[in-house]
Amino acid sequence: MSANRTKAWILAACMVAVAGFSALGKPGTQAAMDTRARVPLEDIFPSQVGDWRLDPAAAVFVRPAVDQARRFQMYDQVLERTYINGQGQRLMLSVAYGRQQSVGLQMHRPEVCYQAGGFQVQDVRPETIQVLGQPFPVTRLQAHMDGRPEPITYWRLLGDGVVTDDSSFKLQQLSLGLRGRVLDGLLVRVSSIDRDTDGAHRRQARFADELARAMSPVQRQRAFGVAPAGSPRP
């Protein structure tokens, strides 16, 4: 067999393999995706989290998550809230849900979005916080613009698993797709306007723990995913 014919057969085999993987990698049934997508983010994230309650001054500007998502073409729901505690401290919660996280439609990382919005982004790093007494992986960063210092803590889910970097995100996309899983995604961001970055991050970590405690097991699995072993987080 000539070298050209050999190359042709290899190319054909690769094309067949790619087509096969594409078929296997399609999301689960439309019905399954519709079921998850129909659950409003408002029903997952409680309005009271420990001592934190919705800020009444900001609540009047909050729109339903489905309506809010119309501002963002890549999401199906976007929930934006401001919480205030008894000491008058405020935290901002932003949650974005996309029902199908394809290779070309990934949950945008805050370090990318903030920089695109004119912020200076610094100290992006993976961290582990305690949620219900268990280690939970998050990403922390600091954003600045015009005297507005904003420490940020966030985490991303693909399906039911937390992903901490883009490489893991893409690998899990492929793995879940090959198993016929629904490739939806959730990004949860907690931030505050605060010059004390370390103090703000500690407060955000406590808020995440209190958020998990305020949720039902079903809500908690949707917001925090499952542990690496495959069981729901406590």
Image (tube, rainbow, N blue to C red):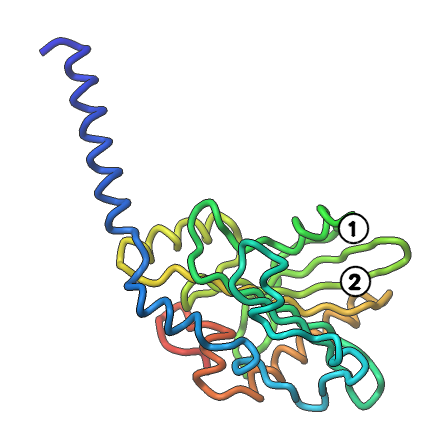
- Disc 2 to disc 1, how far (Cα)? 10 Å
Residue at (60%, 82%) from the top-left corner? 211
The kind of residue on which mark 1 rests is Phe
Q: In the image shown, does 227 or 2 lie closer to the viewer?
A: 2
Residue at (89%, 54%) from the top-left corner? 146
Residue at (79%, 62%) from the top-left corner? 150
Q: Residue 40: image x %, image y %?
A: 51, 77
- Marks 2 and 1 in Cβ contact (< 8 Å): yes
Report which residue position mark 2 lands on: 150
Asked if 12 appears above or below 104 in the picture, the reply is above
CA neighbours of label 1 inside 10 A, class few (<14), some (14 to 19), many (20+): some
Q: In the image shown, does 191 or 103 lie closer to the viewer?
A: 103
The kind of residue on which mark 2 rests is Glu
**Mark 1 residue element:** loop
Asked if 44 appears above or below 29 in the picture, the reply is below
Which quarter of the figure is the N terminus placed in? top left
**Mark 2 residue element:** strand
Q: How many marks?
A: 2
Most distant residue in the left direction:
1
Q: Residue 134: image x %, image y %?
A: 52, 78
CA neighbours of label 2 inside 10 A, class few (<14), some (14 to 19), many (20+): many
Residue at (39%, 55%) from the top-left corner? 172
Most distant residue in the top direction:
2
Q: Residue 199: image x %, image y %?
A: 79, 72
The disc, 2 or 1, on the residue closer to the chain's N-terminal end is 1
Report which residue position mark 1 lands on: 119
Q: Residue 88: image x %, image y %?
A: 84, 84
